Image (cartoon, rainbow, N blue to C red):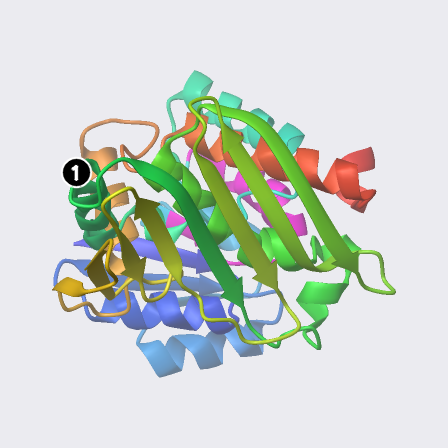
Amino acid sequence: MFRIGIIGAGHIAEKMAATINGMPDVEGYAIASRQYGKAAAFAGRFGFTKAYGSYEELAEDPAVDLVYVATPHSLHYDHVRLCLDRGKAVLCEKAFMANAREAEEVTRISEERKIFLAEAIWTRYMPFQRTVRDIVESGAIGQPMILSAHLGYPVSDKERLIRPELGGGALLDLGVYAINFALMMFGNDIADIASSCMKSDTGVDLQNSIILKYRDGRIADLQSTALCASDRQGIVCGDRGYIVCDNINNMLKAELYDSNHTLTATYNAPPQITGFEYQVRACMDAIREGLTEPRSMPHSETLRVMRIMDGLRSSWGIHFPNDRI
């Protein structure tokens, strides 16, 4: 049985706990919160064996095989370092860190000490994204030339979204999915990036528009917003048709159209527990193989995304306290 410990007992941790409970060979073993009562209540709801009132206690538990870090972006560095320093394998929620400097440091430690470390950007691990990519690369839409990816929810009232000290803003919370969609579909040979954003009174981006121009002429048009619901679609267009993905945050259906806008095929994702199970399984497989990173989201890609987001924030004049450390 593979035992998982979770640092942080919020909403995303609850989703991971429900996922683990649906997997036959995985145990939700330990939960840690800064408040023991919160951890104990979480353990009771999800059947975890151990509840800890400090993150250090969980990181030092020899029975934990993998630690899932589910705290705000700005705290990821400290919590991942805590686990790596104790030799624990880590799966850290997206956005991976507050900035690329932090990401470079923890991936360096992971590789030097040969301790597994992965970013929990769940869309990278889902088999259906590979299905869509295979369709695009098969020539079904002809030569791919342009894509769009939108993700938005009315969440600007959430504390984690508006506070720079928590790594807030639409980019790290939502735009990271649009950027990853573009990299999954078009790769990383980017020649130029143009962008714009609208800031909150607290100095973080509430919505943004990003254009990635590729060296071969392809373009990715990306939007994310914390102010309203968007269509959440990812659309890849070629000279013979296009494919529409229903939700870049968790693609469950894709529709293929020809150049006359006629629907020619519909593809559905396989059944899932929550969608988180794929990243858990990828981590388990990699750890058992002795790898320090998952094949689906290697450190080089995590660093690429973090550097893109650093560049965007710099161009917008958005800075986090973590950037000055």
Can you say which quadrant of the picture contains the C terminus?
top right
Tell me: residue 50, above or below residue 181: below
Identify the amino acid type marked 1: Gly
**Mark 1 crowd level (few <14, some 14–19, many ≥20, 10 Å Cα):** some
The mark tally for this picture is 1
Q: Residue at x 46, y 67 (%)?
A: 12
Q: Is residue 268 visible?
A: no
Q: Position of residue 108 (x, y in %)?
A: 51, 21
Q: Which residues are magenta?
A: 67-87
Which residue occupies the foreground of this view, 182 or 66? Answer: 182
Residue 231 position (above or below residue 168): below
x, y percent for residue 246: 32, 66
Residue identified by numbered label 1: 139
Left or right of 2: which side holds 42?
right
Q: Position of residue 114 (x, y in %)?
A: 37, 22
Q: Residue at x 64, y 68 (%)?
A: 226
